[in-house]
Image (cartoon, coloured by chain):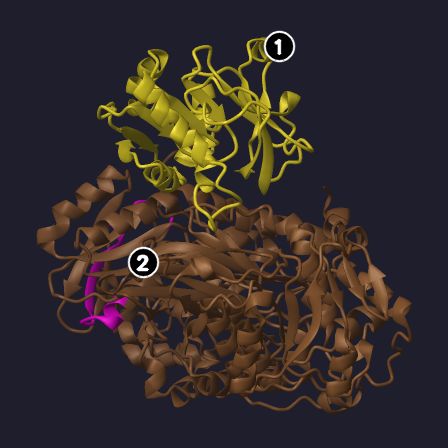
Amino acid sequence: MKVGVVTFPGSLDDRDAARAVRAVGAEAVTLWHGDADLKGVDAVILPGGFSYGDYLRCGAIARFAPVMDALIPAAQGGLPVIGICNGFQVLCESHLLPGALIRNDHRKFNCVDQRLVVENTQTAWTSDFEVGQEITIVLKNGEGGFVADEPTLDRLEGEGRVVFRYAGDNPNGSYRKIAGITNERGNIVGLMPHPEHAVEEGYGPSTDGLPFFTSVLKAVVNA
Amino acid sequence: MTAQIDRPTVDTVGHAAQTPEVDQPWAALGLKADEYASIREIIGRRPTSAELAMYSVMWSEHCSYKSSKVHFSLWGENTTDEMREKLLVGIGENAGVVDIGDGWAVTFKVESHNHPSYVEPYQGAATGVGGIIRDIMSMGARPIAIMDPLRFGNLNHPDTQRVLPGVVAGVGGYGNCIGLPNIGGEVVFDDCYQGNPLVNALCVGAMRIEDIHLAKASGVGNKVILFGAKTGGDGIGGVSVLASETFDAGGPTKRPAVQVGDPFAEKVLIECCLDLYAAHVVDGIQDLGGAGLSCATSELASNGDGGMQIELDRVPLRDASLRPEEILMSESQERMMAVVEPGKLDEFMAITDRWDVEATVLGEVTDGDHLVITWHGEVIVDVPPRSVAHEGPTYHRPLERPAYLDDLQANGTDTLGRPVDGNGLKSDLLTLLASPNLCDKSWVTDQYDRYVLGNTALAMPDDAGVVRVDEETGRGVAVSTDCNSRFAKLDPYTGAQLALAESYRNVATAGATPLAVTDCLNFGSPEDPGVMWQFRESVKGIAEGCKTLGIPVTGGNVSFYNQTGDIAIHPTPVIGVLGVMDDVSRRTPSGWKTAGQVIYLLGMTRNELAGGEWAHVVHGHLGGLPPAVDLGAEQLLGEILVNASRDGLVDAAHDLSDGGLAIALAEAAMRYGVGARIWLDELCERDAIDAFTALYSESTARVIVSVPRSEEVRFTDMCTARGQVHARIGVVDDETDGLDVQGQFTVSLADLREAHTGTLAAVFGG
């Protein structure tokens, strides 16, 4: 079982994502932004960070990296892919997921232990959760406000494609408190909070991130 | 409009030799008449304009330590062989390196970026972080964490509202984007910093011992490579103009002298450097910080074989109109200089290419002791590099104990009105909790990523930041920075030792064995004998304190001229202590979690309120003598805390410092929302103090710990056997809402939190 972790210039949480993959007993494979080669991996993580500095719109340049030429069709074909934070922004820029992420409504970078409610356990990355389960993982970003037009939001909710919603106060002005979404098929998930920072006792707010990675192992085995 | 770039004739060495009488702008560049004369003597002619630029920046206070270095012999005199045992690289390199065991080396250093951050808060703070990270990188290490001790003027002053949000956004903007966890630091407010905020930045890095790199150019024929960002016009003269002169109300705008940071470029540079180190293609390396190419070339050559030849026109430029003098002085960020064997050049270039990092061979290491720099084939610099980098002027500035000190020390706290009953004690607690220096700092710290890299075991608001270094064994380090500058104002020798003691204690409180010290010495003008006396006393206090504690100073930074007009800041010797833990998963957090655990206060409490938060907040008073230092007691306490952590005897520990026991109890309760019943009678009787003194004194060498009942006997036996003073003062209790200080007052968690949170947001917005 091999899970690829993409490194763009400016990726920051790629080491953490690889550690999370190893924590559930899978092999982490480094995927380089400049190579249009997925190296035969069974799933892919687009990690957090500031790809290319994010001086333009977040994820806007990374979307054009050669590795995305290989990843986009593979994801459309059903390869499990998760985009975390900057990775979520890249997925939206790539149109693999709808909507966009804009600057937090309070205009500041915000790093907090964030409560989320799991709303969809049918995706490749969330089957080991329970619907309605509350988890606490790290939220840390400056541009985490999820936005989309009303019909898109209605459709996401109507089709059960809102995977995570913020519990408690809205931390960044995301429409309808949406923290993470999936595509129609459920193989692609994007979320702003960071499951990879919650996989080891003592090094993060919880171990609530582990089920993301155990879920995808099952998804691959059962595929 | 003409696109042609005017390239005036350059001032060559030959031209300089023939035109000794040319009037040179040495004064405008910050040099004194005797310094200029000394340059002419060293090189036997007038300097070229390029040489003058180099000497002026390298002989500035910031780069040459000309006012302070005469006092640095105190470090050496107070460093014993035993202290040197763990010291792999000492003072003088980019950063000190210590051996933390299992083949791991850790490097850490704190630096100031005070003046630029006042002029341009965001970029000043951002490039301060960027600069210290490059210092750590240039030792061969992967940077693993940062911290930022910050000091501002009055919270409610309009200019603080200009400076603080920019500084915080700058520290966060750079640190978050480069991907380093920010694990602690300080946010302190005092009127004395109104015109001179202090922005200090600390970085920690780790490497295997065999991977240590040094800044030296040796091996004749080896290539000298500049890599990273292009050189622009930013930060020209930043060193000499900004960091070495006092701000003057009527002066010209100095904005262009502040550098602009690009954290993305530096993140790529980090990964690129680590790949270069791993491939063993780097012989010597130096970052470009203050004084840019002037510093990098002269220091590399001076530390190595002594000779270097550089073709300055090969430097990639962002602005083609830059003159050679400006290129030499530019402080453009995110640049490094490497010395590489010719046979390894191709591999070096392949790695920089992979990271899209521009790398240019500028020249090579040569025989002899000449640093020769050419510009389109003409020699514009020919100097002995040591004279630029290491043989700058040394001043023996006059020192004098300030006359005001006797009156200040005589004006103690005994006449200040104290609360007379439980209600008064409670009211003062809530006032202190809401005060700028003791309030919740999450408005600031939530803007920093404390989780990236996945090794953070403890971060603010705990007593020390703790990060794992070895993912297999859990071996890691704890770091804390501290300074109460009011103590240092009252008595700089004791104040500096109090900062050292607190930082040492914080590291031990987290469960780590203190190992090494870095310091950032922020002072007023060295031309004021009173300031120089404060400086000397502080250095002496730190050096002698370190000797007693047996931990060496490994490096640091001096920042003078933190002064507006005649008003200098309080002496502010910020101390960073680094400690090691075999397994950081055993670190001790500061908050209570488990009901039923017993709370012990370790250490003696005396009537020591001068310079403390209670006198400052409640009475706006500063006077008297600061708390007594007892480094022997700190060492014993440290051993107790480290052993208790290792043996699982304590579940929480929190240092008593600003605001004393009352604040420590409130913080321990608020951390996880678990309260406690507290009784003070036995403590008051033993130490012959009243409840007020028990709660608000800032006596040192004190910590509260919470001990599982199953471990209580073992814990108290250990204290008794080692002679550690301890008193059972309470019990963690989830039935108690907040704190129940028996016979005095009760205060609910909601009231504590209402007071504690919201102070910063009320000023700076949600």
Question: In the picture shown, does residue B173 fall above or below B64?
Answer: above
Chain B shade in the render: brown
Q: Amino acid at mark 2?
A: Ala
x and y, in percent, of residue A176 in the image = 65, 21
Q: Chain of mark 2?
A: B
Q: From this view, report whether residue B698 is shown above or below residue B479.
A: below
The numbered dot on residue A154 is 1
Question: Is residue B315 part of the magenta span, yes or no?
Answer: yes
Q: Which residue is mark 2?
A: B141
The residue carrying pointer 2 sits among few (fewer than 14), some (14 to 19) or many (20 or more) residues within 10 Å by Cα, namely: many
| Res B573 quadrant in image | bottom right
Provide the letter of the chain coloured yellow. A
Asked which secondary structure carries label 1, the reply is helix
Can residue B253 be seen here? The reply is no
User: Is B438 in the magenta?
Assistant: no
Name the residue rendered at 38%, 43% in the picture.
B265
Q: Where residue B389 sits in the image (x, y, percent)? A: 33, 72
Q: Secondary structure at mark 2?
A: loop
**Left or right of residue B745, residue B70 in this image:** left
Q: Which quadrant would residue B530 be assigned to in this image?
A: bottom right
Q: Residue B433: where, in percent of width, then height?
A: 76, 61
Q: Nearer the viewer, residue B577 or B148?
A: B577
Q: Which residues are magenta?
A: B300-322
